């Protein structure tokens, strides 16, 4: 996830409008959950679902505040598909672990609890997040129970690779019309008149008078010539269309995961999945270093 700002208090977070990492609106922030150990905001709940009837947990890791907006590092789809957790109570270890695994985050030490007045800070949002015992008493009881029930436990975490797609502008195609000159040749028949002398003999009986003297006559000659005219006519319609082509692209990255080592009573070092001196499987023993 992208690097965000470190929130030191829950002041002003409730009531902000949450947006995912692509800028898409998710919903309004309802409650703020604090880390039991550091007291810093760790999670917020955001109204999602139809008519905003559902509250989904969103991590503040990588988030940043911009005026009245809270931009988180998760996607809207990941927030909508987050595990269902009751937003009005302390997050237990298994619930918080499920949320961390869903968002691909490493769970830090400590637990989270709703911030005092987390919901009361919003106009018309209703009463505070705690009922029954006080938030401080519930936090202490939860910590005490965690020490008693999970003594010697170690949480192993690993990163998961989530690959999605986003649409981006890669270029522009333009359609424009320009005028070019083209030489066109064609053939056209052209006729003209020419003069030739025709001589006909006078036959006996033709009533023609002889007249000796100078005389002249003339005829008019005609000829055709090529006449060129131009006319603009539409010949075709041209437009641009886009076509979506889907192809498969391989994506590779490096993810981190934790590996747990243990030392037995003889000082021998082993790793997860190895057997001890008595042949017991590591998974079955689930015991830590001897003290």
Image (cartoon, rainbow, N blue to C red):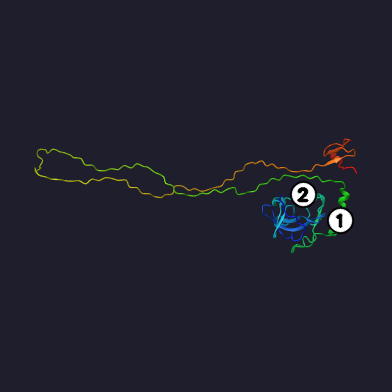
Determine whether, in the image, residue 290 is placed left or right of residue 186.
right
Assign a secondary structure to mark 2: helix
Q: Position of residue 129 (x, y in %)?
A: 80, 59
Against 126, residue 245 (above or below) is above
Name which residue lies at 87% across and 55% down. Answer: 141
Q: Which residue is mark 1?
A: 140
Q: Nearer the viewer, residue 45 or 5?
A: 5
The disc label shown at residue 277, or none:
none
Assign a secondary structure to mark 1: helix
How packed mark 2 is, by other alpha carbons closer than 10 Å (few <14, some 14-19, many 20 or more), is some
Q: Position of residue 172 (x, y in %)?
A: 56, 49
Q: Position of residue 182 (x, y in %)?
A: 41, 45
The disc label shown at residue 100, or none:
2
Q: CA distance from mark 2 to mark 1?
A: 22 Å
Q: Quadrant of residue 188?
A: top left
Q: Earlier in the sequence, mark 2 or mark 1?
A: 2
Q: Position of residue 247 (x, y in %)?
A: 62, 42
How packed mark 1 is, by other alpha carbons closer than 10 Å (few <14, some 14-19, many 20 or more), is few
Mark 1 and mark 2 in contact (Cβ < 8 Å)? no
> Residue lying furthest front in this view?
267
Q: Nearer the viewer, residue 242 or 42?
A: 42
Determine whether, in the image, residue 21 is placed left or right of residue 173.
right
Against 263, residue 115 (above or below) is below
> Residue lying furthest bottom in this view?
123
User: Which quarter of the rendered picture does the C terminus lie within?
Assistant: top right
Determine whether, in the image, residue 272 is placed left or right of residue 241.
right
Q: Number of marks in the image?
A: 2
């Amino acid at each position: 996830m992208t690097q965000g700002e470190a929130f030191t208090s829950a002041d002003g977070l409730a009531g902000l409008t949450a947006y995912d990492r692509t800028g898409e609106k998710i919903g309004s922030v309802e409650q703020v959950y604090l880390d039991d150990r550091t007291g810093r905001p760790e999670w917020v709940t955001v109204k999602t679902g139809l008519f905003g009837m559902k509250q989904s947990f969103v991590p503040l890791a990588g988030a940043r505040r911009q005026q009245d907006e809270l931009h988180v590092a998760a996607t809207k789809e990941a927030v909508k598909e987050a595990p269902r957790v009751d937003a009005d109570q302390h997050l237990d270890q298994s619930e918080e672990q499920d949320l961390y695994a869903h968002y691909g985050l490493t769970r830090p030490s400590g637990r989270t609890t709703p911030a005092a007045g987390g919901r009361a800070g919003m106009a018309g949002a209703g009463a505070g997040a705690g009922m029954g015992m006080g938030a401080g008493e519930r936090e202490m009881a939860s910590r005490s129970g965690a020490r008693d029930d999970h003594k010697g436990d170690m949480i192993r975490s690993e990163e998961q690779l989530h690959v999605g797609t986003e649409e981006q502008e890669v270029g522009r195609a333009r359609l424009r019309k320009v005028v070019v000159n083209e030489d066109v040749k064609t053939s056209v028949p052209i006729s003209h008149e020419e003069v030739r002398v025709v001589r006909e003999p006078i036959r006996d009986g033709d009533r023609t008078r002889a007249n000796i003297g100078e005389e002249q006559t003339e005829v008019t000659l005609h000829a055709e010539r090529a006449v060129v005219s131009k006319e603009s006519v539409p010949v075709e319609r041209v437009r641009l269309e886009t076509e979506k082509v889907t192809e498969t692209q391989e994506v590779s990255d490096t993810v981190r995961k934790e590996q747990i080592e243990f030392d037995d009573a003889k000082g021998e070092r082993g790793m997860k999945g190895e057997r001890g001196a008595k042949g017991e499987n590591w998974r079955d023993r689930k015991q830590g270093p001897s003290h």
